[in-house]
Amino acid sequence: MAVLETTKTRATKAAKTKPKQLSVELPLGQILDGDCIEAMRSIPSASIDLVFADPPYNLQLGGDLNRPDGSHVDAVTDDWDKFDTFSAYDTFTRDWLIEAKRILKPDGALWVIGSYHNIYRVGAILQDLGFWILNDIVWRKSNPMPNFRGTRFTNAHETLLWCSQGEKAKYHFNYRAMKTLNDELQMRSDWVLPICNGAERLKEGGHKVHPTQKPEALLYRVLLSTTERGDVVLDPFFGTGTTGAVAKRLGRSWIGCERENVYRDAALKRIEKELPLDESALTTMQAGRSAPKVAFGALVENGFIKPGTEVFDKKRRWVATVRADGSLAHGKQTGSIHGLGKELQGAPSCNGWTFWHYEVDGDVKPIDAARQLYLLAVED
């Protein structure tokens, strides 16, 4: 099975001529202070591989939100999410999208995440500016916050728009890595992932540092699917640095824009602790059969089994390394948990969940134990 090479989707014509590059070095690994539009104006044209944007949603909340027991719900009530009119929000959106389009390379891409409050306005504006929507991804939250008032359906999803620079622009898509991450089943446009909680949620004094911190698993999938090692990712609404933390782990360079001091400080501390994966763990590949209800890749992208972990059969005849897309490598042989196990044994089939084991604090467990932990976390 071949090691993955990036799939470049090609249009019938090449993208337009690359804008003139400014002789300014990129501020890699830095969080630019102040307004994101002004900060992006300092970035050279056609220098960024991917922009991931989690802009203000303009939620238009009317008053506080409380649980049935009277306790307060941490919601977005900050000034940065408030706009006087839809027109003011549209102007802000157009301005930052114009800069995003300028700084992206001709084959670069834009991801924007939002809710029903803003994503349709954002989508119309980015189309007006010449971006081409490749997919709208539905992030279906496996553990959404309930609708305490009981007056509407529970808001259980958010929408991500993945866009190229134009209808005929080239773009990167690691189709094979996504298929492998999903246990050899084609990755769909509905992603079931839990919201950010547990140890991953940044807190100070018992309170969330940021009300809308995104789960690392979401950014893991975005970056693994549409960037390569060494690519430059810019996040104009950096917040507490989820994009930077995942980018560093996956060997991508990052730049952030964030005007709030408390978020910048939290992000820098968080990213400083992050360790990049070694090169062998970052290599990705493809395989080819159907998936169980829980993909091994879901465990990897959610951190239940980390890339670089060594797994082995119960008798330790074979040792393999877990890679970033959920594939395993044993010497020059690569495959899914099922495919590689089958190949090594010369067997007609293999249940990788029970065949492969890993060590946790001196205890040897089948990787199925990690799957059960993942299922418990999703149900919480």
Image (cartoon, grey):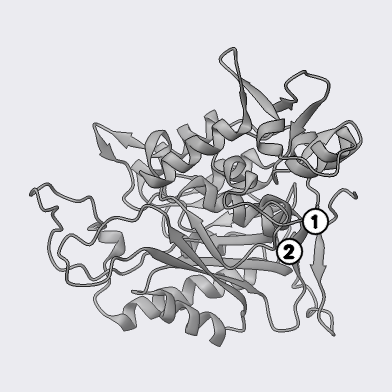
- Which residue is depicted at the point 86% across and 39% down? 347
- Which residue is depicted at the point 24% across and 55% down? 75
Above or below for 273 versus 353: above
> How far is the residue under mark 1 from the one under mark 2?
18 Å
Above or below for 196 versus 105: above
Mark toward the viewer: 1 or 2: 1
Residue, far front? 348
Task: Give coordinates of residue 277: x percent, y percent.
Answer: 69, 34
Quarter assignment of residue 76: bottom left
Residue, far top? 362
Mark carried by residue 201: none
Q: Quadrant of the C terminus?
A: top left
Which of these two is toward me, 94 or 364? 364
Mark 1 = which residue? Answer: 288
- Which residue is depicted at the point 14% across and 52% down? 67
Mark 2 = which residue? Answer: 173
Quarter assignment of residue 362: top right
